[in-house]
Amino acid sequence: MNNATTTMRAKRLYPTIAVFFCSLLLLSNILAVKPIEIGSFGTTINLGSLQLWPLIFDGGAILFPLAYVLGDVISEIYGFKTARKVILTGFFMELVVVFTIFIVELLPSAAGWNNDEAFLTILGFVPRIVLASLCGYLVGELLNSFVLVKIKVKTGNPKLWVRLIGSTLVGEAADTLTFCTIAYFGVISLPQFLNYTIVGYIFKCILEVMVLPITYRVVAYLKVEDPK
């Protein structure tokens, strides 16, 4: 493969991955407005201050781990410097969305529009939640990317699974703890807070491990088709 072909493919594939990353990030933050509780049948099981049952997490936990997967792919193929640019771009786009929604909330509704309450329920935001989301994302993604690249330097190419899982455990821990602490500490009971934090963390890590075979295939494909 000559240098011209490699450059053309780099220009074609990298922007697509970056767009997918930012799209998953924005969708996850919209879905996060719905808290999900699984196993609520009138029975609550606690272990000290930890609520074991029912399970509590938010809708954003379904898609957000996939953003981490793409973050891993970008870090593995293009390096930390490039990954940092994508992460900061995603952060900027989150700010744009938050600011735009805020402006739309302030503008008067058209005659006949009677869905302001529904609009605010889904897209309206609480400053504390927005701050939590932005801080959690920035800290978690940067750590995820940084740890992956550092593990790669220490272990070398043969141990991709080590850096994928290792970076996920660190990044998701920082993200989940930062978000939950800023958003919900002192707002919900301690058992609920611990459940929300721990279950959310475990759920996101398990999901990333489940898609590990797909991550491997994507990384292998890009290393051939879109080398650094």
Image: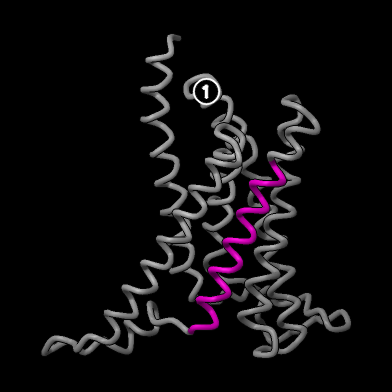
Q: Secondary structure at mark 1?
A: loop
- Whether residue 157 is situated above or below residue 54 in the rendered picture: above
- Colour scheme shown: one colour
Task: Between residue 172 and residue 52, name the one nearer to us.
Answer: 172
Q: Position of residue 173 (x, y in %)?
A: 72, 61
Kindly identify the residue that appears in the image at 52 percent across and 40 percent down: 82
* Above/below status of 53 relative to 17: below
Is residue 200 inside the magenta stretch? no
- 143 is within the stretch colored magenta: yes
Residue that sits furthest to the front in the current view: 81
- In the orientation shown, which residue stands out farthest toward the right? 48
**Number of marks drawn:** 1
Where, by quadrant of the figure, is residue 181 drawn?
bottom right
**24 or 55, which lies in front?**
24
Image location (x, y in percent) of residue 94: 43, 65
* Residue 44 spot, x, y in % from top left: 76, 84
* Magenta segment, prevailing SS (helix, strand or loop): helix
Tell which residue pokes out farthest to the left in this image: 111
Residue, disc 1: 227
Residue at the image position 54 percent from the left and 31 percent from the top: 218
Q: Left or right: 205 with respect to 71?
A: right
Instruction: Classify 228 as above or below 93.
Output: above
- Tell me: 52 left or right of 13: right
Query: Callout 1: 10 Å neighbours few (<14), some, many (20+)?
Result: few
Q: Quadrant of the N terminus?
A: top left
Which contiguous range is marked in magenta?
Answer: 127-148
74 or 34, which lies in front? 74
Residue 148 vs residue 14: left or right?
A: right
Residue at (78% x, 75% y) in the render: 52
- The amino acid sitting under disc 1 is Pro
